[in-house]
Amino acid sequence: MSARRRQNTGMDDRHLDEAVLGLPQPLGVSGGDTEAEVAQLRATVEQLQTALDNRPRIEHAVGMLMVLMSCSQDVAVFTLKRVSQYTNRKVIDVADLMTGSVSTRTPLPQDLGDALALTPASLRRTAAAGGRVAGPF
C-alpha cells in the first residue's frame, strides 16, 4: 500500500499488518501493553513448553497401551485419561508411572493397576470395529 493511500485510510503499517494479514502487533508497539499482559503471555509460553515436553512421554504410554490392549490410539488415549481420572493423578504422572514400571520391572501402584483392570473388553471391541470411543467406562 502506498504512503499516500495509507494517509488517506489513516492506517499505518502496524494496523495494516493486523487488519489485513491477521498478524498481531509485537509487544511494545501499541504502547498499551501492561505487566499483566506480559505475565499472561509468559504463562502461556510456559504452558505450551510443558505440553511439548510432556507429549513424547504420554505418547510412549499410549503406545504401550495400544500394544498391551491390542487397541487403537483413540482407545489407548481414552484409557489413559480415564485411569488418570480414576486415580486422581495427572495424565503425565500416570504415563510416567506406566513407562517407569516397565523400564524398572517394578509393579504398578495398586490403584493404577486396579484402574487399568477396570478397562472393559468393550473398549477393545470398539477399537477392533474401527469405532471411536464415547461415553463412560
Image (cartoon, rainbow, N blue to C red):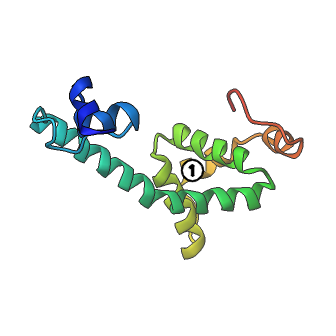
Residue topped by disc 1: 112
Tell me: 78 left or right of 128.
Answer: left
- Left/right placement of residue 57 relative to residue 118 reads left
Going 57% across and 60% down the picture, which residue do you hit?
Answer: 98
Q: Quadrant of residue 66?
A: bottom right
Count of marks, rendered view: 1
**Which residue is at the front of the view, 93 or 118?**
93
Label 1 environment density (alpha carbons within 10 Å; few <14, some 14–19, many ≥20)? many
Residue 51 in the image, given as x and y percentages of width and height: 43, 52
Image spot of residue 125 (x, y percent): 86, 41
User: Which quadrant holds residue 28?
Assistant: top left
Mark 1 element type:
helix
Q: Amino acid at mark 1?
A: Leu
Q: In the image, is residue 51 above or below residue 130?
A: below
Foreground residue, 110 or 95? 95
Residue in the foreground of this view, choosing between 26 and 135:
26
Q: Position of residue 47 (x, y in %)?
A: 34, 48
On the rendered structure, is 30 left or right of 3?
A: left
Left/right of residue 30 with respect to residue 116 in the rendered view: left
Image quarter where the N terminus lies is top left
Look at 56% across and 70% down and name the residue there. 106
